[in-house]
Image (cartoon, rainbow, N blue to C red):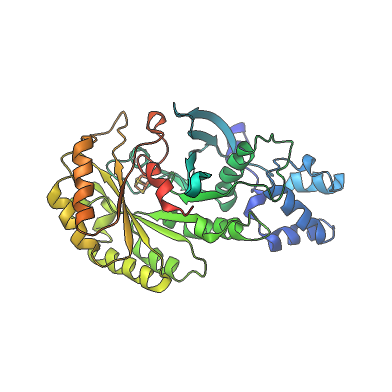
Amino acid sequence: MNAMTTALTPKPSALDLDPDGLTELVTTIGQPRYRAQQVMRWLYRGVRSFDEMTDLPKPLRTALAERIAASSLKPSRSSRSSDGVTTKVLFHLGDGALVESVHMRHAGARNKVRTTICVSSQAGCAYGCAFCATGQGGYGRNLTSGEILEQILFFLREEEGQTDALPLPANSRPVTNIVFMGMGEPFANYDNVMQSIRALNAPWGLGLGARHITVSTVGLVPQIHQFTAEPLQIGLAISLHAPNDELRDSIMPVNRKYSLAELMPACREYVAATGRRITFEYVLLAGVNDADEQALELARLLRGLLCHVNLIPMNPTASSLFVRPSGERMRTFAEVLDLAGIPVTLRDTQGGDIQAACGQLRTSAQRLVPD
Ligand code: SF4
């Protein structure tokens, strides 16, 4: 076995285990069941090494470290927007794959500071949206639920100015919103994404309310149906970006598999079953999808649906073929939707100077979550 082979077979992440899985491991090692609860508490307080779990006997810490990894993500590069509110971090996974995550600070209701963490669910992405830098780079692999959770725990530690050696106080975390809107298509990694959401929500995990979590999809219809039937009240966002099949086919290859004739009924079923408002993401591309007629077509498509449209100014990347429309054009597009009775937001590209995550979508993350 050479060094390369070793690098490609990292130990599983401890955060991939739920309480049952950890209990099974701990009892297999010959330790009492309650030790699993202690380990779980440390993990969700952000500890990154078994040696820091100081109330565990040393032989157990050693045995755990031989079998699983307390942390598997290594932050390798971090950049902050010029206004200081958005931070993007590039992580190395255990096998060398790379993912990005973004942390944003923004004002919520009554001017309270809120934070949103935008996580990646895959290394790369297979869906090839024409306007997205990640999509142009191709697909790597699915992230495990532990790798998803670690992105969040990293920022929670940062948020409180903690170091790796100082576990987070259990009940002092800021109100945080999580959006699955980083690299990858979350519904193409459905089981791991849902496993991470259950851990985010569970009392033994982070205890975060489901309404503070939003999943964004390009429109994988079978998984939208599956998501609609989930017992948790998680938000849903659809990356729409075009008001008709012809245009959507040309910029989002997924539309050739799941056309608007399938996607829109699935969205309506989600709203009818959950009573939740659905969010539609719409990246504005100059001369492509930003005309008044397209705004009217979009309004017709969404009429009668409990929804909200996030208009996202194109955030050009070095290789992008697309251009951001003028401010006036974007405002007019928003006004046409507004006049047609469709709730709409046009956001600034906060963090645009650091080209934050998932090509384009990250900029709308703040609108997806409740205050
Ligand atoms: S926008 Fe999202 S789904 Fe589309 S290519 Fe980029 S990462 Fe993939």
Residue 224 placed where, x, y %?
39, 64
Residue 133 placed where, x, y %?
34, 37
Q: In this view, does 67 lie to the left or right of 273?
A: right
Residue 243 seen by the camera: no
Question: For the point 76% across and 48% down, which residue is it?
Answer: 64
Residue 204 placed where, x, y %?
68, 59
Front residue (pair 188, 227): 227
Residue at the bottom extreme?
273
Quadrant of res 25? bottom right
In this rendering, the answer to whether 282 lies above or below 231 is above
Quadrant of res 139? top left
Front residue (pair 52, 68): 52
Residue 275 placed where, x, y %?
41, 70
Q: In this view, does 173 lie to the left or right of 369?
A: right
Question: For the point 16% across and 51% down, which residue is it?
Answer: 294
Residue 32 seen by the camera: yes
Residue at the front extreme?
110
Question: For the point 61% across and 57% down, which residue is it?
Answer: 199
Question: For the point 40% across and 49% down, which residue is it?
Answer: 367
In this rendering, the answer to whether 85 lies above or below 115 is above
Quadrant where the N terminus sits is top right
In this rendering, the answer to whether 289 lies above or below 317 is below
